[in-house]
Image (tube, rainbow, N blue to C red):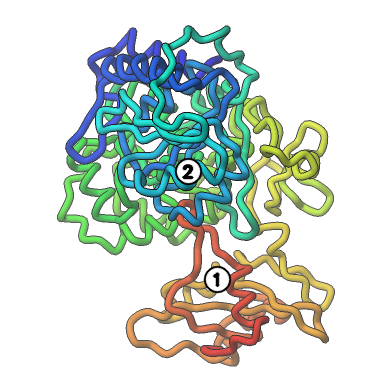
């Protein structure tokens, strides 16, 4: 189960089929296989060998694909870095990963050498055809590249394939090491996005630095379909790409679906869509109802997974209204159980190998064969999972536990509230008190605490009611997955910032 075999097989069976697009550009499987072969020789010529780490700092680009494919073929470990990051942000990541080479696109060419030198890595810039590299770096001083050497024995399926840097809602990123076998299994046809080979492709809202961005890519390639990239996850960009490419699948996190639902439907021909999906964060039933109303001819599914564990559960279209609020049952090959404190534990053959260079954090992340997700949930008698919140985000007030998502679900229906996030702040008397950050629509003033508590009186126990309301222009979220940065909101209040309360 090697990642390089996915591209090889697709290029053998369907060489003329489109494998990826970005705006007007497109690549076929055959073209990508040829460019990947050239890139293998190029990487070998600069001394890249099996087991070396290659950090790739690039905006979304088709030219990253040959680097990704060549690394997999050689057995080097690919580590994608977000192209939106500046040099000062990339340097600590490169220092943490300690790559043999830091490769960038031309947009980062002015900074890549300095970052690479600081991190002790070779630096390289790939050209628009992604088949040659201009290299500089420690010990090279512009010296001619050595002759390409044939690769040693290729990678084994248990060898590391890729390192994803988790975005996370708090703390520094961790490097999630995923093996070839795990990447292959995560993208293999199953209870996922496609059931047949060939056909229209998927519009991908995620950047190429994110687990989902590469997993969607490999899922498409396993089925010999195209992945359609966009430069931004704006509603217009996504819908325009659906119309342009006659795509059959569109995935969006809840925040993206909210933007799509606010866009004029008549501007884009989305009749080619057959499946629309969501997940990552809690998908409220009212949002699912609106998505289904917008695309009544499509199947709608909810997925729950993680960078560390791949896909965990899915909620099928026929269960959406029978199990409102649920994220479904465990997908084939995955076991989902709850710890005594309600934490969701998952076990499957596609779980990560480790956190890079973090043995203590790796040990803490596992309970035997089970990965600790950090999410808290409930399982009903039929095995359907509902996510209550993050373990570290559960609010402890007066000896009681409050799940932020439960309060948020109700506050979204408060008149004039456009977005909301609930979090806890320390309190001498109660331990913590419940707070709500609200974004109001139009020019409406934020509600007072008494009005909010009156609204919730018959809906929630009194200890779950917010004791403070924080008016904000926008809820801070992680860029790719839309997770609320509750720690940042908490800091706004605990560091003495009381404006807007």
Q: Is residue 329 left or right of residue 360?
A: left
Q: Which residue is mark 1?
A: 421
Picture quarter with the C terminus: bottom right
- So how many labels did they put on this image? 2
Nearer the observer: mark 2 or 1; the answer is 2
Q: Residue at x 22, y 30 (%)?
A: 26
The circle drawn on residue 100 is none
Q: Residue at x 59, y 89 (%)?
A: 498
Secondary structure under the numbered disc 1 in the rendered image: strand
User: In the image shown, does 344 or 392 lie closer to the viewer?
Assistant: 392
- Residue 360 appears in which quarter of the rendering? top right
Q: Is residue 365 above or below residue 416?
A: above
Q: Position of residue 350 (x, y in %)?
A: 62, 28
Picture quarter with the N terminus: top right
| Image marks 2 and 1: residues in contact by CB distance under 8 Å | no
Q: Position of residue 190 (x, y in %)?
A: 51, 25
**Is residue 430 visible to the viewer in this orientation of the structure?**
yes
Circle 2 Cα neighbour tier, 10 Å, few/some/many (<14 / 14–19 / ≥20): many
- Residue 18 appears in which quarter of the rendering? top left
Q: Earlier in the sequence, mark 2 or mark 1?
A: 2
Distance between the Cα atoms at labels 2 and 1? 28 Å
Q: Residue at x 43, y 43 (%)?
A: 113
Q: Position of residue 282 (x, y in %)?
A: 54, 56
Q: Residue at x 56, y 8 (%)?
A: 152
User: In the image shown, does 493 or 379 lie closer to the viewer?
Assistant: 493
Q: Which residue is mark 2?
A: 81
Q: Is residue 242 left or right of residue 363?
A: left
């Amino acid at each position: 189960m090697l990642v390089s075999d996915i591209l090889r097989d697709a290029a053998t069976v369907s060489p003329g089929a489109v494998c990826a697009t970005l705006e007007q550009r497109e690549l076929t499987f055959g073209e990508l296989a040829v460019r990947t072969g050239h890139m293998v020789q190029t990487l070998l010529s600069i001394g890249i060998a099996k087991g070396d780490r290659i950090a790739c700092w690039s905006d979304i680009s088709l030219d990253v694909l040959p680097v990704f494919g060549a690394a997999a073929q050689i057995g080097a470990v690919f580590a994608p870095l977000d192209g939106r990051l500046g040099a000062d942000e990339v340097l600590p990541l490169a220092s943490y990963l300690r790559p043999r080479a830091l490769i960038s696109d031309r947009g980062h060419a002015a900074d890549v050498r300095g970052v690479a030198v600081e991190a002790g890595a070779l630096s390289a810039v790939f050209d628009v055809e992604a088949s040659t590299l201009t290299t500089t770096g420690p010990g090279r001083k512009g010296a001619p590249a050595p002759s390409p050497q044939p690769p040693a024995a290729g990678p084994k399926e248990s060898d590391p394939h890729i390192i994803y840097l988790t975005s996370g809602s708090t703390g520094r990123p961790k490097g999630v090491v995923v093996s070839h076998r795990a990447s292959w299994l995560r993208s293999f046809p199953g209870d996922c996005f496609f059931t047949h080979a060939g056909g229209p492709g998927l519009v991908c809202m995620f950047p190429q630095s994110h687990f989902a961005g590469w997993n969607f890519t490999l899922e498409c390639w396993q089925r010999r379909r195209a992945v359609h990239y966009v430069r931004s996850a704006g509603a217009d960009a996504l819908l325009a790409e659906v119309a342009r490419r006659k795509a059959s699948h569109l995935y969006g996190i809840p925040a993206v679906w909210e933007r799509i639902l606010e866009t004029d439907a008549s501007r884009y021909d989305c009749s080619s869509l057959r499946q629309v999906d969501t997940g990552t964060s809690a998908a409220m039933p009212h949002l699912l109802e609106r998505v289904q109303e917008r695309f009544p001819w499509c199947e709608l599914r909810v997925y729950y997974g993680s960078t560390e564990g791949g896909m965990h559960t899915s909620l099928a279209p026929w269960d959406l209204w029978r199990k409102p609020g649920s994220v479904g049952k465990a997908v084939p090959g995955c076991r989902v159980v709850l710890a005594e404190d309600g934490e969701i534990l998952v076990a499957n053959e596609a779980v990560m190998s480790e956190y890079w260079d973090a043995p203590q954090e790796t040990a803490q992340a596992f309970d035997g064969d089970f990965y600790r997700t950090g999410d808290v949930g409930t399982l009903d008698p039929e095995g359907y999972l509902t996510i209550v919140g993050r373990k570290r985000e559960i609010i402890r007030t007066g000896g009681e536990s409050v799940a932020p998502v439960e309060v948020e679900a109700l506050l979204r229906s408060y008149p004039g509230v456009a977005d909301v996030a609930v979090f806890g702040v320390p309190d001498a008397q109660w331990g913590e008190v419940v707070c709500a950050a609200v974004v109001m629509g139009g020019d409406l003033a934020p509600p007072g605490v008494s009005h909010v508590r009156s609204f919730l009186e018959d809906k929630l126990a009194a200890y779950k009611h917010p004791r403070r309301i924080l008016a904000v222009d926008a809820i801070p979220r992680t860029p790719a997955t839309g997770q609320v940065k509750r720690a940042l909101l908490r800091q706004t209040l605990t560091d003495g910032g009381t404006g807007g309360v």
